[in-house]
Image (cartoon, helix red, strand yellow):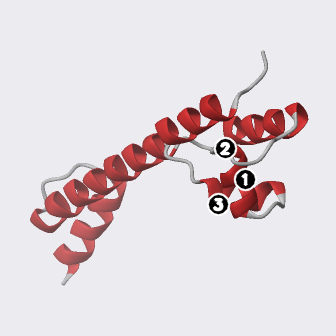
Amino acid sequence: MNPTPSLIRQYLREREISVRAIAARLGVHPGHLQRVLNGEREGSRAFLKSVLEMAKAMPDRRQQRSDSLERLIDAATHVFFLQRGHFESEICSRASRSRQKE
């Protein structure tokens, strides 16, 4: 399959990967890459293939954002119950023991 500039643009947009991030990893100027992806400059098949391969190797930012939000919610829940002494975990049991000693 030969990657096309429009296919690569769509792939980057769907995964919220910036042209600048791809360009930095490939060691090319972001403006050059942007012009190739917009069709203003001709890009070789090898260049387009390397851009798509690099994009596929990068983490999907949507998944990262989801994981970060999930970790934040877990931490907030943990702190909420920790402060009230109602959370059964190794971390909380140590905290409640130290409060009981006081």
Quick one: SS at disc 1?
A: helix
In terms of depth relative to the viewer, which is nearer, 80 or 35? 35
Q: Considering only order in the chain, which callout, 3 or 2, is on the residue closer to the N terminus? A: 3
Q: Image quadrant for the C terminus? A: bottom left
Q: Which amino acid does label 3 sit on?
A: Arg
Judged left or right of residue 43, residue 36 is left
Marks 3,1: beta carbons within 8 A: no
Q: Residue at x 24, y 56 (%)?
A: 78
Residue 20, which numbered label?
A: 3
Q: Position of residue 43 (x, y in %)?
A: 82, 41
Q: Name the residue under label 1.
A: 33
Whether label 2 touches label 1, CB < 8 Å: yes
On the image, the x and y values in percent for residue 53 come to 77, 35
Mark identifier at residue 49: none
Q: Badge 1: few (under 14), some or many (20 or more) residues near its Cα, within 10 Å? A: many
Residue located beneath label 2 in the image: 37
Q: Residue furthest bottom?
A: 102
